[in-house]
Amino acid sequence: MALLLGTKTRVLMALRKEAKRRGLSVTAYMEAAPPETLIALIRQVDPAVNPAEIVPGLPDLPAVDVTRWGLPPEQTLSTSLSRRIPVVSAAVAAARAGDHRPAVDLLTRSAGDWALRSVAVHALGEAAADDDTWVRSWRAVTGEYDPHLAVLDAHALFWLAWKLRGNKPGAATRADQHDAFHETVVRAETAARRATELAPNDPTPWCTLVTLARAQGYDPIAFAAIWKELQARDPLHRTGHEFALMYLSPEGNGSYEHLFAFAERAAAASPSLAFLVVQVAYDLEDHDERVWQDPRVRRALDVLLTWLGSATGGRGVHANSDRSWAAYGLVSSGRGAEAVPLFAQLGTDAAGRPWEDFGDNAATVFDSYRRRACAATT
């Protein structure tokens, strides 16, 4: 977590300054100074941070109590994506219970509302990857040529591929997991291509292909062809832009400057895509924590806050996702006080990125950013 790394850097600088003033080395000063002195210094740098996280051996002091700011306690936080939108949550719950009908109804009604459809397919795809009993019941009723079912099948295979692989680093992933992942990715690509034929106007299967581009090792020409098809159907497709960033990342086929250029072009097209610039900063922060002071990032945060303050931006299906990116970016940029209202609107919703990137620690990281935001108001 780059913010914590930044805090450690600033604490070390403060320790060096104090040690130099006393004519001691940093090590000698830390050994001589009483714990309360070190704690006070750390709290000057970041009043919300737990001293034990910065200097091993210091007391594990209580965190900032976010309930004083009207925020829900940590134990009530949820990382469930489907809870964000009641109609999606209801369809997922029914599907997991074996009833396909609410999912069919939702996907039928979402045709044309590509934002809702993207969220619904993503959530239902995960449910299908976990247990496809309800999908098989659906197929038994409508047959193999249902376009909504084809779109869902492709994304469910995308989910299944990642579940088979697991979330451990490559070196810690078994060979059989790698094999299962790549085999399933190929199946997902085939299913997505079929879905584009059965649902020719739907951007969703093209988005699924964008999500698979990096895993499949598409070259820039192949990726550009897929991207062109997605753009033709929905030029502001949010999920497609998110996954395009992953393909274009330096770990894939690009550089951070390419990422910023891509994100800024998208944000210029619509404030609904301003979060992409914040996402680029998030991807870069472990390499350069100063990115949060980059004028491009600060400008994007301002645009994002304005967007969230509008009726369209504040009530859309991606509103909480935008709030999460804005809150993370504001805290990281030293503007934590501005993030408190966003955390209040998020309530118990700790789902989605960037929090989900921390795996089992998602809720804990979400809470740590709330604490830093609240501490910045004092």
Image (tube, grey):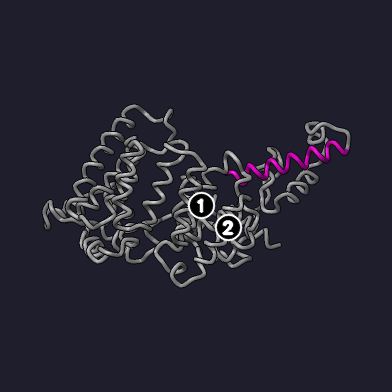
Main SS type for the magenta part?
helix
Magenta region = 1-21
Q: According to the image, label 1 marks what residue? A: 277
| Nearer the observer, 103 or 113 | 113
Circles 1 and 2, Cβ within 8 Å, touching? The answer is yes
Please give the name of the residue rendered at 51% of the width and 52% of the height, measured from the top-left corner. Answer: 277
Q: Position of residue 315 (x, y in %)?
A: 43, 69
| Nearer the observer, 284 or 4 | 284
* Callout 2 amino acid: Arg
Disc 1 or 2, which lies upstream in sequence? 1
Q: Which mark is residue 299?
A: 2
The local secondary structure at tag 2 comes to helix
Q: Is residue 305 left or right of residue 114?
A: right
Q: Is residue 70 left or right of residue 176?
A: right
Q: Quadrant of residue 164?
A: top left
Location of the C terminus (image quadrant): bottom right
